[in-house]
Amino acid sequence: MLYWFGKIIIVPFFCLIFRPRVVNWKGLRSKGPVMYLCNHFSLADAVALAAMSPRGIRFMALEKLFVKPLPNAFFRSLNMLPAGEGGGSHLGPVKRAIALLNEGYAFGIFPEGHRSPVYTEMDAFEKGAAFIALRANVPIIPVYMDPLSWKRMKFRMVVGERIIPEQVKAECPGQKPVDALADRIVDTLNTLRVETEELMPPRQRRKV
């Protein structure tokens, strides 16, 4: 599969050029269905997450990329699937994500739903990731990547502790499960952001 061939070819160059530093790299290891959740600031985010993860991760992309036979075969060989392949209209991506997790795959998702328009700030998070994790009942591996890694030519990533949806649900009995989990995701990514900032020399840190 092109995905694994790409890892063999790209990862050595990625490490040589960007000198990645990953805090809690072991946290990326997983077995069974799991959701990798990360902030989103560049088209290269999925590539970086796939490069650093020891496990294959499946992502979803716009359906229009899969219309023609050649692009369809290419993107599918990269572990990417059309977002609407779950049936229905706006619920298609959600159904497809849940189906992938039910099949035991690792699924990558960006809770912002799109690239952040402000390069140094995370955009508002959508609740789709929380809904999917609850419905599929799978753990979440939160990841934060420094949005200025590409400009600084120094890639920095912090991997957080797993978020277990059922635990969050039990800890917040007076709150709707999807809201409680969505809030936990936001808090966790903000905490990881601060940890990522601390990896940089003081003069290079952004104001948090």
Image (tube, rainbow, N blue to C red):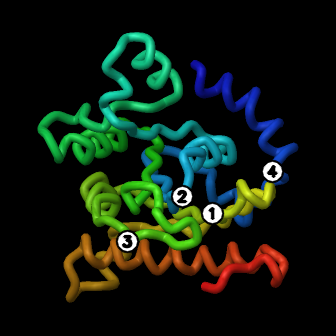
Residue 201, by quadrant, is bottom right
Depth check: give the residue in front, 108 or 46. Answer: 46
The image shows residue 11 at horizontal and vertical percentages of 76, 37
How far apart, in angstroms, are the residues tagged by discs 1 and 4?
A: 13 Å
Give the label on residue 180, or none.
Answer: none
Q: Who's the residue at 70% across and 77% down the image?
A: 197
Q: Amino acid at mark 2?
A: Phe
Which residue does the numbered mark 3 point to in the structure image? 124
First in sequence: mark 4 or mark 3?
4
Relative side of 96 to 32, left or right: left
Secondary element at tag 2: loop
The residue at the far right in this view is 16
How far apart, in angstroms, are the residues tagged by discs 1 and 3?
A: 16 Å
First in sequence: mark 2 or mark 4?
4
Asked whether the residues under the numbered discs 2 and 4 touch, taking CB atoms below 8 Å apart as contact, a structural biologist would say: no
Q: Who's the residue at 37% across and 56% down the image?
A: 113
The image shows residue 63 at horizontal and vertical percentages of 30, 31
